[in-house]
Image: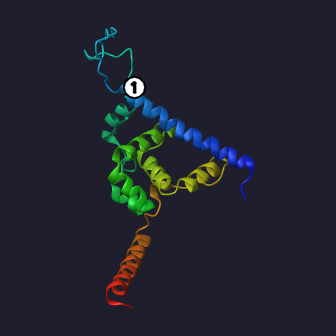
């Protein structure tokens, strides 16, 4: 049973999380070049075009700086491939990464900006969010209350567990094919 207070905390957490996504989305929209039909263009400083610092910094400047400084990144800061999403959280985030990579990338970057975490940690959290948003939000609420922190970046990556899971998947798939095509 969830109390009214916990429901309100969950609602505030969801609004904060969604609010960051909206702010980052609006920042990306604001940074996009817009055509200026028939109206007089406002004079803007051109220092940025000449190589100097801009008086109007881009809202995505921190992302560009992080990407440029990523040349000497640690292995735990490097992103993992879509198969990593499949291994960590299952088929839902894997399919989202393949079908709508822009949505996935925006979500990961928004989470990185909000929390200041590494890319791998943001990917793990967004994979968990796409797999089961309610459980992910409850886990984050428990973490805010002082509960244990779950490491989504390295979830389900134990080699022994992967071998066991793969073996079971092959056996169950084989039994399913036998039952479907040849009868039990």
Residue 64: name its quadrant.
top left
Image-based side of 104 in relation to 143, left or right? left
What residue sits right under mark 1 in the picture? 30
In this view, the residue farthest toward the front is 38
The percent coordinates of residue 138 (x first, y second) are 61, 53
Residue drawn where x is 40% and y is 69% of the image: 159
Instruction: Please name whichever residue, 29 or 137, is drawn nearer the observer in this view of the structure.
Output: 29
Label 1 secondary element? helix
Residue 84: name its quadrant.
bottom left
Instruction: Please name whichever residue, 69 or 137, is drawn nearer the observer in this view of the structure.
Output: 137
Task: Establish if 45 lies above or below 131.
Answer: above
Say if residue 80 shows up in the picture.
no
Residue drawn where x is 48% and y is 57% of the image: 131
Instruction: Please name whichever residue, 124 or 101, is drawn nearer the observer in this view of the structure.
Output: 101
Instruction: Please name whichever residue, 50 or 74, is drawn nearer the observer in this view of the structure.
Output: 50
Residue drawn where x is 38% and y is 33% of the image: 63
């Amino acid at each position: 049973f969830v109390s009214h207070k916990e429901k309100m905390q969950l609602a505030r957490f969801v609004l904060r999380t969604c609010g960051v996504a909206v702010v980052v989305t609006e920042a990306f929209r604001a940074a996009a070049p817009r055509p200026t039909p028939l109206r007089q263009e406002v004079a803007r400083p051109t220092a940025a075009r000449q190589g100097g610092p801009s008086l109007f910094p881009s809202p995505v400047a921190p992302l560009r700086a992080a990407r440029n400084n990523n040349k000497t990144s640690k292995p735990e800061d490097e992103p993992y491939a879509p198969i990593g999403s499949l291994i960590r959280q299952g088929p839902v985030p894997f399919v989202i990464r393949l079908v709508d990579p822009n949505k996935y990338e925006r979500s990961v970057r928004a989470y990185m900006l909000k929390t200041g975490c590494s890319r791998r940690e943001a990917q793990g959290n967004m994979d968990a969010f796409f797999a089961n948003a309610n459980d992910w939000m409850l886990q984050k609420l428990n973490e805010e209350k002082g509960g244990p922190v779950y490491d989504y970046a390295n979830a389900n990556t134990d080699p022994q567990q992967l071998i066991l899971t793969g073996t079971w998947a092959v056996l169950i798939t084989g039994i399913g094919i036998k039952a479907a095509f040849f009868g039990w």
